[in-house]
Amino acid sequence: MPNIATTLSAARRLHAGRTALRHADRDMTYAELDDAVRSFASALLASGLSPGDRVAVFAKNCPEYVITMYGAFAAGMVIVPVNAKLAGPELAVILEDSETRLLVHDAASAVLVDEVAGPDLATLGIGPAFDRFLAVGSPDQQVADLGEDSVAWLFYTSGTTGRPKGAMLTHRNLTAMMWLELADVCDYRAEDVVLHVTPLSHGGGLYLLGAVARGATNLIHSGSSFVAGDVLRLIEREGVTVIAFLAPTMIVMLLDADAETGADTASLRRAVYGGAPMHLDHARRMVDRFGGVFVQIYGQGESPMTITYLDLARGPVDDDRLISAGVPHPGVEVAVFDAEDRPVTVGTTGEICVRGDTVMRGYLGNPTATAAALRNGWLHTGDVGRYDEHGRLTLLDRSKDVIISGGTNIYPREVEDALLLHPGVRQVVVFGEPDDVWGESVTAAVVREAAADVAADELIAWCRTLIAGFKKPKRVVFVEELPSNAYGKVLRREVRDRLAADSTGHQRDGRLPGLSVRRTS
Ligand code: AMP
């Protein structure tokens, strides 16, 4: 089976002198990157590690991150990218679960790594130690031949509850993902300047694959915080042509900062977004400002970045299309099943299930979870959605987020969409709270627009004009901000759990622990 690292060797043959990576004021050509990757692979093997061993990386985005990733591929080892924002105990769980042998980390995480590293774990700090390690290796190292279904990447799910699970992504999965990315999402070219602004442990890292294969210049942003004005200015200064991945909240931040920054973004020809729902009014603003530059992707760690896509450069940009997640990639089978795994009819809601070469091999060391996720040969995504008559898939929610009130399913997203249409509402998250009579009742946590003084009863009445009465929130809580994870996804369950603590009397003034509340109704 081809090793995904051979795409870098091929790019080097074609584009040796072109810039592969740009980070801060440092550039690396394809020849330099390929030499470093082979040296790293050779040093890994010389250090006593064997093909199949796990190499974790816990660092902000930087060139060494990319060298570690491709170096592990080239050596036939498995990369375990860990979100650099995780706390010590969370890192420890992943290191233990993955049986990681070597942990590569940056200086910022050195203290934390010291605390969690056990005697069996070797660590390598990015900086002088990393450079010495590289110097031991040889740039003549051959890229490893692989067996069938060799694992390349352990993708730890970003779930906010339960023990994280490591989705085993094989070289075949990554190759299939890369093909579909190049075909449907972005036809990267050597002339492209590709901005990676999200953590390489997630979308940014996966989108390196196509960009590297085509010899593009990859602008590696540290990915530790997202300052919209800086990103807009960077696009102008560097002539960025592609943004590898953005969470919807980041796009809203870019739109908000746009007028004040006044940056010229005309160089941009493609930008990818997804990973979380984008509400209609935000999508409208995005299209009005950027036209058809954007393409949405719907995927999950278990089928990396690749289930459906929505290319806004092609086809009409009507509301139904904008709120959908687009159409399946060719060769990826996407079905909607009922609770007994039977396909439902067009327009009927069910669980989205996926089959194809992008689907993971399973969860490492967790046959029970693997059997549940891959039952009957289909990946069960846990996402709820439906097809429309044009073959487009619309996502409603995670099945776990559905609110069941009086025996009726209520999809939080429908209520959120209604609230977001109100001019006084900036951001919202809707969730269910226990209710003695109805089982669950609908609650909305709302961030208001700066100057807006809209009241809870006004918002509830507003919803009534747009959605059925049983769906309208019973309770509206105003907050200053909503928590989001490192990838910009609003943490619905975290808001819900904090509010639950609130109603048990822990916070008698109605404040959400960790969230500042303006007014409660
Ligand atoms: P992760 O495995 O962390 O990438 O999270 C994947 C989950 O994010 C999916 O199962 C969906 O629930 C959600 N998601 C991903 N892409 C989209 C999208 N385009 N629209 C709505 N939700 C999405």
Image (spheres, helix red, strand yellow):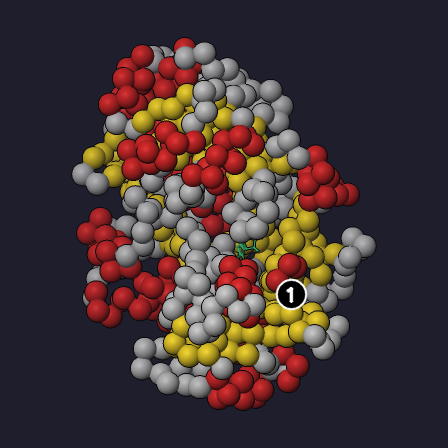
Residue at position x 62%, y 23% from top?
148
Which quadrant contains ligand 1? bottom right
Asked if one can make out residue 329 in the rendered structure from this viewpoint, the answer is no
Q: Which residue is mark 1?
A: 402
Taking the image as shown, residue 488 lies to the left or right of residue 369, namely left
When the figure is inspected, residue 21 is found, relative to residue 255, above or below; the finding is above
At 31% from the left and 18% from the top, the residue drawn is 134
- Amino acid at pointer 1: Val
Position in image of residue 212 (x %, y %): 38, 35
Q: Nearer the viewer, residue 329 or 339?
A: 339
- Judge whether residue 399 can be spotted in this image: yes
Identify the secondary structure beneath mark 1: loop
Q: Crowding at label 1, few (<14), some or many (≥20) Cα neighbours within 10 Å?
A: some
Rendered location of residue 116, percent (x, y): 43, 31
Q: Position of residue 341 (x, y in %)?
A: 78, 53
Instruction: Choose between 286 and 506: the one closer to the eye.
Output: 506
Answer with left or right where residue 447 lies relative to residue 341: left
